[in-house]
Image (cartoon, rainbow, N blue to C red):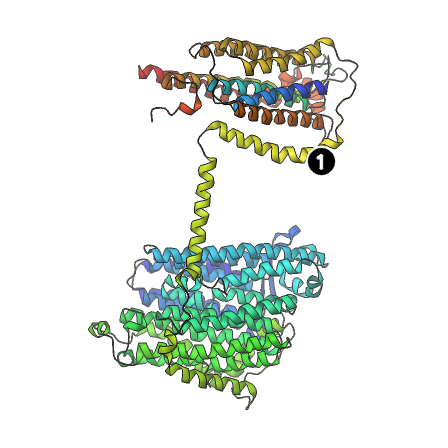
Amino acid sequence: MILILAITIGCLFAGGFYLLLRRSLVKLILGLILLSHGVNLLIFTMGDGVRRGAPPIVDKNGVAPFNVADPVVQALILTAIVISFGLTAFILTLAYRANQVTGSDDLDTMQGEG
Amino acid sequence: MLPAIVLITLALAPLGLLARTGPRPLVGWALALLPALSFALLLFQLPQVTGTTQIREVIPWVPAMGVELNFALDGLSLLFALVITGIGTLIIGYAGHYMHDDPGLGRFLLYLLLFMGAMLGLVLAGNVLTMFIFWELTSVTSYLLIGYKHDYPGARRGALQSLVITAGGGLALLLGLLILGEGARQAGVAPNQIYNFDAIIAAGDAIKAGPLYTPALLLILVGAFTKSAQFPFHFWLPGAMQAPTPASAFLHSATMVKAGVYLLARLAPGLGDTPLWNAALVLVGGFTFAFGALVATRKDDIKALLAYTTLSMLGGLIMLIGLGGKYAAEAVVVNILAHALYKSALFMIAGIIDHEAGSRDLRQLGGLRRMMPATAFFIALALLSQMGIPVFFGFVGKELLIEAALSSPLADPLRYAALTAIVVAAVGYIIAAWRLFKYAFLGTPSPTLAQRHHVADPRGMLVPPAIPALLSIIIPLALLPWASQLLAPAASVIYGKEIGFKLALWHGVNSALMISSAAILVGAVLARFERPLAAMPPHLPAWADGATLLDRLLAGVDRVGALITRSLQTGQLRRYMLYNTITLLLITGVPFVLYVLPGLTFFSPDPQLRVYEAFAAALIPIAVVATIRAESRLSAIIAVGVVGAMVSLFFVLFSAPDLALTQLLIEVLSTVFLLLVFSILPARFATLSSNTTRMRDAILAGMVGLLVAGLVLATATTTSFEPLAPYYLENSLAKGKGQNVVNVILVDFRGFDTMGEVTVLLTALLGIYGLLRMRREKR
């Protein structure tokens, strides 16, 4: 199962880096989205093992299920997901503004008015 | 008491700023009480410092690493500390006269006192690291003093060059001292003692036998040679003559430049007397000794002339330390004291000439003997001592110098090289001193000088140089027993064993006297032909001057820096991304392939693997490729959405329901955002990069992907620390009153993190709002 995750994360990183190396602003944004997915999954693998069918929810007596998943990385990723959304939203707005001002998506032709 | 002397001088340095107001010469003398007090305190220690004993005071700092503020007083440090505070007293008094109309006098005295504290710390340090801190502080204060007249480009250049050379040498020295400490550790010294001078010297033989001796010594020599202006680093010292004369007289003749000599003298009993040590010190020191004296005979600027004789004498001292032996140790200490006395007097009088006659260029002076008879008298005393004329203190020093070379235990070639250097230098000193006196004081005044009014002996300003000038003749005539009491312990420290010696003026007719008399005779004859001698080749071409070469080197560094900046900093984001990617691959990828990859298990059977898991895993790479290859905005949004959906599915499958929920919500929101923004962009993406660029990027990105996948495999299968999870699982209900542990962590255990997260979102929102507002105002 860790092999599946490793391949998936590798693909997300490769795709993210490739898109970050592009000249188009839109592709850069898509690359950031892919990369943030990759990083979230990477954090996911860094905990106390990846488990099936045992979410970190304790019963009424405060006893965790057998072989429970790691709640710490999940809490970290939850924060990361929300923050990467904030970042994506901001960059999208920035791209929107840049397109209005320069009329272009090509990072090389974006010299602005100054 | 030792730390107090150092730290109080440093702490009271701001008192120098008092000299901004009031009758300046008086304030100068009042401030001179500070070093005078230290001088007196140190003088009282004289009876307790005998043989090689040390008075030691330690303030622990990082005891585990052998780092401490460690002060020690023995004969050698006492001699230096007395020179520093004694000459320092005179210099501060002198500065009050010399710079009485300079509005910056307060700042100057502040620097000077700071320097004095640093220099005292340097010579009183009992630990190489303590010494190094003060060593660097002297470099910095020297920079401030040389650059004092910072309105002049020459002063800035001289200051910068001295800083580059001495601080660069300081770096080499630090490295050398650390290696030396490591060598001491290997030689069996206790770890908390490895940086102490006495422990290093006691373990000297074992260190010399170890493999670290040679690198440590070479680096320390670079530090000492740069600080003491040895060839080929000598050129910063003449450049440092841009400093106001009081600073030149103090730092660049009597004290700071002797720091390198001091360090080598201190290390000599432990690290000395190896072929490398002897050859390096005798050859470099001896060459500088002769070279400096010869160049000095051709200089017309009095301060430049004195600077070259100074670096020459420093070379002589270093050569003596290299020669080794009892007489060499005696010669070092006698010459240090003799040189400090006559050279500080000479520099101060050079300042008086400059001050009164308006120039210090020998070609524009002349006939000062009639206008300034007292000045002429005192400079004559100092010059005679420098020339080594009998009954002056310099003569005692020169006799010992020759004796040291004659009786040195070294092989003949080195001994003869040393002897040649001594004779050349002795002759050079005579010619240089004669030229100085002849062109400044004899003959008739130059036309410019004749038109100047009120060229006369100054009153107060002449007192400070008069004292060391008079001592140059009084010590050998009347105070030799007292001087022996001061100098014998110092020589013992350099020699490593106690030397009981009595200085004497007359040793009978021996070979040293014959050589010295011959040198005086030759010098006197050659001095008559100084004009043709000065015109004689070789004259170094201008480009071969060390200062010019350093300027070029620095300019070259600037150019290369600009070139690298221009080629790397293109202003294109993807270029920076490219460099980062390549760097990541090099510094993480290469070690990974070399060390981690061979031990990696790629495949472990997983009986629980479900079909839908494999399905989700297979969809992600497909969706990633689809995102990359998308030609229209809509297909890109769909492909990226598929990736997000599959990631949420992963979270569902692998026990993270909260994450799955959040990811789905965010995915929906992101898609809406993307649709909104992409709607104004062109419907189809243009292909902007060439095929080769795309191929290169694909290869690099693929390598990053492989690397990260490998790192995931490598790290997920190892546990190097206690997991945090059990704590949260156990305490979630008890302390956080919640069953969903992830939620409890977010809102309770790590509540402040969540607050930070909310702040980020709010900031992003404000940014977005601002960007959209700008649009409206524009219309």
B166 vs A79: above or below: below
Instruction: Pick whichever, B482 or B700, lies toward us.
Output: B700
Q: Secondary structure at mark 1?
A: helix
Give the class, few, some or many, for how many residues have Cα within 10 Å of label 1's Cα (few <14, many ≥20): few
Label tally? 1
Instruction: Pick whichever, B47 or A112, lies toward us.
Output: A112
Instruction: Pick whichever, A27 or B44, lies toward us.
Output: A27
> Extreme front residue here?
B691
Q: In the rendered view, does B275 fall on the left or right side of B19?
A: right
Query: In x, y percent, where is residue A53?
Result: 73, 12
B150 vs B585: above or below: below
Query: Mark 1: which amino acid?
Result: Tyr
Which of the 4 image quarters holds residue B522? bottom left
Q: Which residue is mark 1?
A: B595
- Residue at 54% from the left image edge and 74% from the top image edge: B333
Query: Is residue B471 visible in the rendered structure shown here?
Result: no
B108 vs B288: above or below: above
Query: In x, y percent, where is residue B316?
Result: 52, 73
Instruction: Pick whichever, B379 or B407, lies toward us.
Output: B407
Which of the 4 image quarters holds residue B242? bottom left
Which of the 4 image quarters holds residue B716? top right
- Label 1 chain ID: B
Q: Which quadrant of the figure contains the C terminus of chain B?
A: top left
Query: In x, y percent, where is residue B345?
Result: 40, 74
Q: In the rendered view, does A87 fall on the left or right side of B49?
A: left
